[in-house]
Image: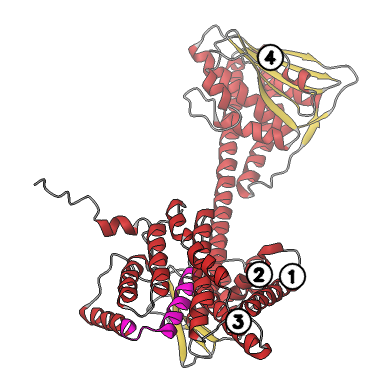
Amino acid sequence: MAPTNPASPSLPQRLVRRENLLLAGMLLLLHLASQWGFGSAMSTSLMIAHLGMFLLWQPLWQRESHLSGQQGVLFLASIIVFLGTLNWWTLAGWQILLIGLLGGRPLVSRGDRTVYMLALFMLVCDLLLETVPNLFFVRGLPVLLVAAFHYGLLVIPFLLPFIPLARTVQARAQAVDLFRAVTTALMTALVAVSSLLSMYYSGGNYLTELLRTLLVLAGFLLLISWLLTPRAGPGGLLQLWERSLLNIGTPFEDWLLELASLAQSEPTPAQFLNAGLKALTQLPWCMGVAWREDPQAAPVGHGRAGRHYTDIEVDKRRVRLYLRQAPGATLLLHIKLLISVLEVFHDAKTREQALARQAHIQAVYETGARVTHDIKNLLQSLQTLTMALIEAENDPATRERGRKLLEKQLPVITQRLHLALDKLQSPGKSKSETAPLREWWEGFKARNQHEPVVFHDRIPADANPSIPVELFDSVAQNLLENARNKKQMERDLRVTALLTVNDHGIALEISDDGSAIPADKAQQLLSQPVSSSDGLGIGLYQAAQLAEGMGYALRLRRNVPGDVCFALETADKPAAQRAGPALQQVN
């Protein structure tokens, strides 16, 4: 004999995974037991098989769990009592119980709804057309109609196995909605009782009164649904039911509005949580709330203590809610819902504070990076002045020119140092000074006259607009410093600075005839910091951000071997003029 594979599922396990097959077998056996000489030995045998199928299908307990000895004895005794007292009353109660379990199942997909609606239809028909008439000795039912239902309902169990279920059939504990289950069972019982009362009161036919009761009840539910939710359509009744579950003790919308208001008014997550827990004491079922920030601290609370309470976990705090009466399952569910919403708002407040802190750190970082480059540029200017003074020391003809250059540049350097200090003291609040374009251009050429840079300008005689000095200084010095670093590796590098003023605005171009910037670096150069060893990266990124905030744009206009050009230009220039020749990237 071949050894048994322990991994292969057994027959009960395979049945459990086919919930629709179990449901079909359970309904078929129950239907045959009520039709095949109910109360006979054959009917009892069918009921025993039906109960076995029910135990495999039942959604109340984990199907892998094991009953203790005491539970097993009690369960077995219950089955024996049920079978020993089996009659129409017992069968009616069992059918109503099954209707409640089927009506309380969560329906995920269209297949789920189809399977469980067909199963409910079959159970309700068995109850109303077979069990209730036999229980109350109802006579005069049309034989053909009753036979059509008895035999026609047999189609449903054979149809259910072919309708797939989307639900994972390894059912969880408590996989039944208690409120829907109770409502479905009570509504079915109400239809049966109302039909009998109407029949005895009017002396009419049972089927006629049953149909009338169904129509009246359906019309009443639709009317209530339409009056309260006129725009909801056919799903209005379900919306009303779900809303009623949310609004136990307080309108759920009011709680959301209260938390939203507290989130706006309370500055920190801790203060928001304190205010939110305090708001719970305003609800009619809550007397007070108490918690400890840590196990050693004194308790903090609002309201007053009472005899009835429940403990919940809120942001790693053990919070005790004091209630006016002993809480039921519905109220506990409602409390968990309100607390869950409070925690969502608290988490959002915590993330908001973290983002604000991160934004502040980012502002300090960016300001420090920009000031670092400003100081590097100032240091370069000082080095240039120092070199000019050393060269003029032994030459009386140039000594006077060096002194004038020093007198002219020292105030500029002092002013730029003050601007750098202001940025460090107040990140994001530094002032931007303006100056005439011609004055800035002459000063820029004078400061860099000892640099190997060729200066050109195309400025109309009557044009002298004002420019932001900090922006033009920062961009020009960064670009010259990058060119200087590049010249250390490419000795014959020639650098050109061109200032243009026309109808489209101002454009400052600094170009060189060296090698092109690698394509991957060129794509990221002005949009984010780029790690490099030649000075490109954070300085140009900061300069581009500063230009954007002042109405200018810093772009890499050309990038081919022998012609690398950066341009600072007015941002509102036409796209064709702004782009110039198509930017060529190195492959």
Q: Looking at the image, tell me whether mark 1 or mark 3 is earlier in sequence order.
A: 1
Q: Which amino acid does label 1 sit on?
A: Trp
Foreground: 404 or 462?
A: 462
Q: In the rendering, at what x and y percent does residue 574 appear?
A: 80, 23
Q: Distance between the residues labelled 4 and 3?
A: 68 Å
Which amino acid type is shown beneath numbered disc 2?
Leu
Task: Write down the residue under mark 3.
Answer: 249
Q: Which of marks 4 and 3 is nearer the N terminus?
A: 3
| Labels 4, 2: front one | 2
User: Is 355 located above or below residue 444 in the figure?
Assistant: below
Label 4, label 2: how far apart the Cα atoms are: 64 Å
Q: Name the residue under label 1.
A: 226
Q: Is residue 27 visible?
A: yes
Query: Circle 4 is placed at which residue position?
Result: 582
**Relative depth, front residue between 14 and 106:** 14
Within 10 Å of disc 1 (Cα), the crowding (few <14, some 14-19, many 20+) is some
